[in-house]
Image: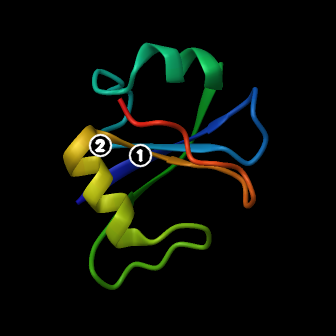
Amino acid sequence: MRCAVYKSRRRANTYLYIEAENDFRRVPQALLHMLGTLELVLTLELDTRRTLAQADPQEVRRQLLEQGYYLQLPPGDFPAASS
């Protein structure tokens, strides 16, 4: 599974993973508004061998499939409510 990772310029150390570059259709508008300007940082392949520094790749894949995005918050922040 391929995905694109964006960082929020408004919220430090907050990243939004989406299924395809520039495809924000499944991301709630309220979340996009909260994150402000997003900057593409990388695209990557999420396969079974992939490890991520701050997230469980299986959970990222599951949320991408189920809701179309995964929100990575800084350590210690509470997860955003799913829509």
- What residue is drawn where x is 63% and y is 20%? 34
Which amino acid, mark 2?
A: Glu
Q: Position of residue 72 (x, y in %)?
A: 57, 51
- Closer to us: 78 or 22: 78
In the image, is residue 36 above or below residue 21? above
Residues tagged 1 and 2 counted as in contact (Cβ below 8 A):
yes
Q: Is residue 37 visible?
A: no
In whole angstroms, how far apart are the C-alphas of marks 1 and 2?
6 Å
- Please give the residue where the numbered disc 1 appears in the rendered image: 4
Q: Is residue 25 visible?
A: yes
- Residue farthest along the bottom direction in this orientation: 49
Q: Residues within 10 Å of mark 1 (few under 14, many from 20)?
A: some
Helix, strand or loop at disc 2?
Answer: loop
In the image, is residue 61 above or below residue 29? below
- Please give the residue where the numbered disc 2 appears in the rendered image: 19
Q: Position of residue 31 (x, y in %)?
A: 52, 23
Screen quadrant of the N terminus: bottom left
Please tell me which of labels 1 and 2 falls first in the chain.
1
- What residue is drawn where x is 31% and y is 51%? 63
- Closer to us: 4 or 11: 11
Left or right: residue 43 compared with residue 31: left
Q: How many marks?
A: 2
- What residue is drawn where x is 65% and y is 19%? 36
